[in-house]
Amino acid sequence: MIMGTRQQHERTRRLLQRLVDDQGWAGTPVMIIGILFLLLIGFQATLWLNGKNVAEAATQSGYTVARAYESNDDAGVAAAQQLLDELRGSLRDAKITITRTADTVTVTVTGRVATVMPGVELPPVTSTLTGPVERWVPAQ
C-alpha cells in the first residue's frame, strides 16, 4: 500500500510539474473551444433574427392582401405562404392565422428557426399585426 501511495504521489507531482511548465499551452484548447462556442452562438442568433424578419415580412404581406377591399382570409394566407415559400428554409413549421372582422384584420405568423447547436431548442418566432380593413365609404 505504501508503495502504491508513493507511486501515485510521484505521478501527481509529475502532472503538476508539466502543467506548471507548459508555458501557456494548456489554455490554448480552452480558448479554441470558447471561440468556437461563441461563433456557434453568433450563427444561432443570426438565424433567429433572420427568422424573425421573415415572419414579420410574411405577416405584412398577409395583412396587406387580407385588409384589401373585398378580400378575404384565404387570400391573405396565400400571400403570406407564397412569401414563406420564396424564402424557404428560414422558418420551419410555419403557421399562418388570419382573423378578419368587419372592421379589423389580425395576422399572426409563427414558426421555428433552424438550430446550429445540437440539443438547443429556441423559442418559436411569432409576429402579429392588427389593423383596419379597407372599406368603401360613400361621399356625403
Image (cartoon, helix red, strand yellow):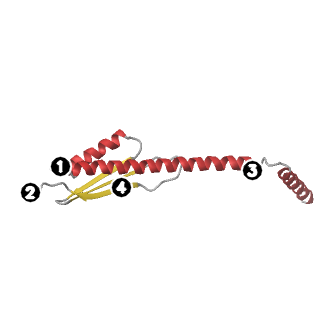
Q: Earlier in the sequence, mark 4 or mark 1?
A: 1
Give the alpha-carbon distance from disc 4 to disc 1, as whole Å: 21 Å
Give the alpha-carbon distance from disc 4 to disc 2, as whole Å: 36 Å
Q: Circle 3 sits in a helix, a strand or a loop, which is it?
A: helix
- Is 69 displayed left or right of 62 in the figure? left
- Residue 128: where, in percent of width, then height? 33, 57
- Residue 104: where, in percent of width, then height? 22, 59
Could you tell me if the residues under marks 3 and 2 are in contact, i.e. CB atoms within 8 Å?
Answer: no
Could you tell me if the residues under marks 1 and 2 are in contact, i.e. CB atoms within 8 Å?
Answer: no
Give the alpha-carbon distance from disc 1 to disc 2, as whole Å: 22 Å
Three-letter code for the amino acid on which mark 3 is drawn: Gly
Q: Say which of marks 4 and 2 sits in front.
A: 2
Label 3 sits on residue: 27
- Residue 37: where, in percent of width, then height? 61, 49
Disc 2: CA contacts within 10 A as few (<14), some (14-19) or many (>=20): few
Q: Earlier in the sequence, mark 3 or mark 2?
A: 3
Question: Is residue 117 visible in the rendered structure shown here?
Answer: no
Label 4 sits on residue: 127
Disc marking residue 95: none
Disc marking residue 71: 1
